[in-house]
Image (cartoon, grey):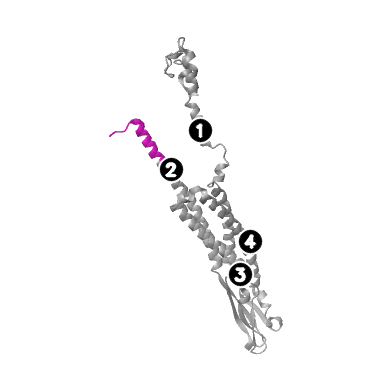
Amino acid sequence: MALPLEEKGNVEAFGNGRTKLRSQQLGNLGSVCPADCKWKLFAIFAFATCGGYSGGLRLSVDCANKSESDLNIDIAFAYPFRLHQVNFDAPTCEGKHREKLSLIGDFSSSAEFFVTIAVFAFLYSLAATVVYIFFQNKYRENNRGPLIDFIVTVVFSFLWLVGSSAWAKGLSDVKIATDPDEVLLLMSACKQQSNKCLPVRSPVMSSLNTSVVFGFLNFILWAGNIWFVFKETGWHASGQRHPPDTMEKQSSSYNQGGYNQDSYGPAGGYNQPGSYGQVGEYGQSQSYGQSGPTSFTNQI
């Protein structure tokens, strides 16, 4: 059974509307998912370069009595940088006696805080991506999802700034505590002029430097996405008093009224020398005094 032209047009318009809505949803997925992927990517690099670090240094103590010398003193340390628990033996150059020493400092608080932020940022980004793709209706229900996303993004931006700054200071202290020249000052044998103490190998800190860079990059990325997440909330929509769609609807309603009709044209009642009731627009056969004001009022 063929549909009337008017109903057929409505069906096509409805189908086009659903297609357009679906396209907009897919477009939103394409625009939001890459941001979440970036959050996860940089968070992975941040805690991987810091949490997976292990390094060491090597020292050499050449005593006046060569038999008491130790030219390979290896000192290894790793995350979370509790250096005061890193012990090593060093010769005293006084017979076969050796002394037990340890590095100085505990920098685990700043390192663990930084890694914890990175891990939770990764987990949240993963969960947000899954919710947005597979549970978009729940995400937008009562505007709860965008509001929670906005608040969490602001909190993580602040945490990234604090954690990265704290870890940058902690890394600076770690470099000082593991400097071979500073460690040699802890040995009693190196305080004697007759003995020669030299650094053989210094620790490589390139991955730790990279972790600090990724920390501040995460702060910039999360802080930059605050505005885009804010636009998803109802606060942004309520701030626009006159949305463009409303103004367009109002202007189109006026254009469909009696002001743009042909009532003022050659076929209108105002240009006819005879009765005003001859106009087809009003649909009346009476005089102007009876039908004109009434129909004009209905038009307005």
Name which of mark 3 and mark 2 comes first in the sequence: 2
Tag 1 residue: 248
User: Residue 258: where, in percent of width, then height?
Assistant: 48, 22
Left or right: where does residue 56 sit relative to residue 256?
right
256 lies above or below 128: above
Q: Single out the residue that lies furthest toward the bottom.
A: 95
User: Residue 80: where, in percent of width, then height?
Assistant: 58, 70
Name which of mark 2 and mark 4 comes first in the sequence: 2
Give the spatial CA distance, label 3 vs label 1: 60 Å
Secondary structure under badge 2? helix
Tag 4 residue: 165
Between label 3 and label 1, give the one nearer the viewer: 1
Give the spatial CA distance, label 2 vs label 4: 44 Å
Name which of mark 3 and mark 1 comes first in the sequence: 3
**Span shown in magenta:** 1-17
Say if mark 4 contacts mark 3, CB within 8 Å.
no
Left or right: where does residue 245 sit relative to residue 61?
left
93 lies above or below 103: below
Residue type at numbered disc 4: Ser
Residue 116: image tag = none
Q: Residues within 10 Å of mark 2 (few under 14, many from 20)?
A: few
Give the spatial CA distance, label 1 vs label 4: 50 Å
Q: Nearer the viewer, residue 288 or 130?
A: 288
Residue type at numbered disc 3: Ser
Between label 3 and label 2, give the one nearer the viewer: 2
Q: Check the picture and name the quadrant holding the N terminus.
A: top left
